Image: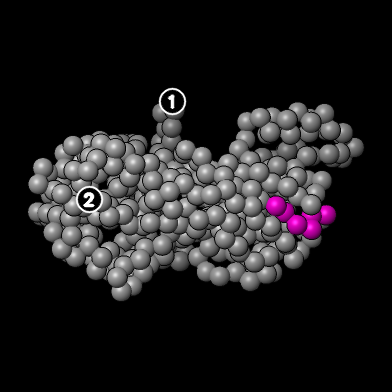
Amino acid sequence: MWWDIDMDGTGTNFISTVPTQFSTETAWRDHWMQAIYFLPKPIQVSPNEEMSLHCSHDEYSLWFNVGEKPEGPAFCSCQLHCALSRYDFYRLNALDENRAFVEWIQKFCKNKQILTFGDGSLISLYASQSAAKVYAYESSDASARMIESYVSLNKISNVKVIQSFKKLDDLTKEVTVLSEPFFSTAILPWHGFLRFHALIKELQNEMGDMLKVEVMPKKCKLLCLPVKFEHLWKIAAPVGIVDGFDLSDFDVLCQKARTIADPIVEQHSLFEYPSISTGLQQEVLTLNIKSKAEAATTVIIPENSQTNALVFWTETEFNGEMDFATISNGLLSNCAIGEKPEWHPGHRQGVYFLPFETIEKAKRIEIFIEQQENDLDFKFKVL
């Protein structure tokens, strides 16, 4: 859904927020959000078939349904739609489709005592198919109820949902901790692994020498790709002079506000925004579950002078005795210079926008990264 405005009533001068997928005649306005309503029940339609769409509203919201008559609003009774984001639901469905990773889980967990971390992650259910015992640690009540309901529905007898490490059975002396690791609280790509690292420390502090712990995954790589965005760079650039109006004072105000309020690396769902690669991807940091990563400096040399941003994401490695698996929250496939990157739609990537005055001048970009307690600290120098 989107809106159109007839600016002068003649039907010739429109402002529209129509998505570019549906029209080639409108200006870029991706920063004006459209709305998507998921119908309560899917329907099958044929080309040129008519259907009745009912729209209802109250003081605060709209709701829709397709059929002979309007229906009342669809309320969430499971509470998951309050606790989990659309990204979380996408991740749940995507994991179910990742058969190679599911098969790796089942091989790795065979006959082991498993402890899983994740907000509503299905990894505990897959592990249960070969593990001796699975403890699914769920910090929120909503996700704990969800896993418990799946366990009950599928009559799984070797999964126990816990919300405290003290709920581990007294006879458990050795456990393998397993996580995707993605959490609903993660905003930037590396937050999931850092949250996993914090939970491991919490487990070790609480259980001490009483529990022997094996951890998987053990590390993840932070990767970087220089790109030229077609439009997204504009959200960080000054406006300048438009149709004779000098907006430089407004630009000064906005740039100061961005420096104060916005993180230097922002989160964006890049599958929505066209770009081309202007260099090769590089590993800029390795996060390790056993120790804090050493601060690292990396030099990025773009092949295209029109580079206007750097994109960051992580690849997490799962290594078993005989095989391995890699989970990425960034590129879905390798991207050569000049090609359009294909970004994972179920995750947000991190973006650093080059200062506007350095675009088309940048010969090299130095990145300094230091691991903090619960985040990464970035510093950039554009030369």
Distance from Cα at disc 1 to Cα at disc 2: 56 Å
Location of mark 2 (residue): 212
Where on the picture, by quarter, is residue 282?
bottom right
Residue 303, position as x, y percentages in the image: 74, 66
What residue sits 61% from the left and 64% below the top?
Answer: 281
Rendered image: mark on residue 59 = 1
> Of the residues tagged 1 and 2, which is closer to the observer?
2
**Front-most of residues 189 and 198:** 198
Residue 119, position as x, y percentages in the image: 32, 44
Where on the picture, by quarter, is residue 3?
top right
Which badge, 1 or 2, comes first in the chain's sequence?
A: 1
Q: Is residue 329 left or right of residue 184?
A: right
Name the kind of residue labelled 2 in the image.
Lys
- Which type of secondary structure does the marked residue at label 1 adopt? loop
- Which type of secondary structure does the marked residue at label 2 adopt? strand
Q: What is the span of residues highlighted in magenta in the rendered image? A: 361-366
**Front-most of residues 146 and 362:** 362
What residue sits 69% from the left and 59% below the top?
Answer: 300
Residue 354, position as x, y percentages in the image: 72, 48
Magenta stretch: includes residue 85: no
What residue sits 36% from the left and 57% below the top?
Answer: 217
Name the kind of residue labelled 1 in the image.
Glu
Q: Is the stretch drawn in magenta largely helix, strand or loop?
A: loop
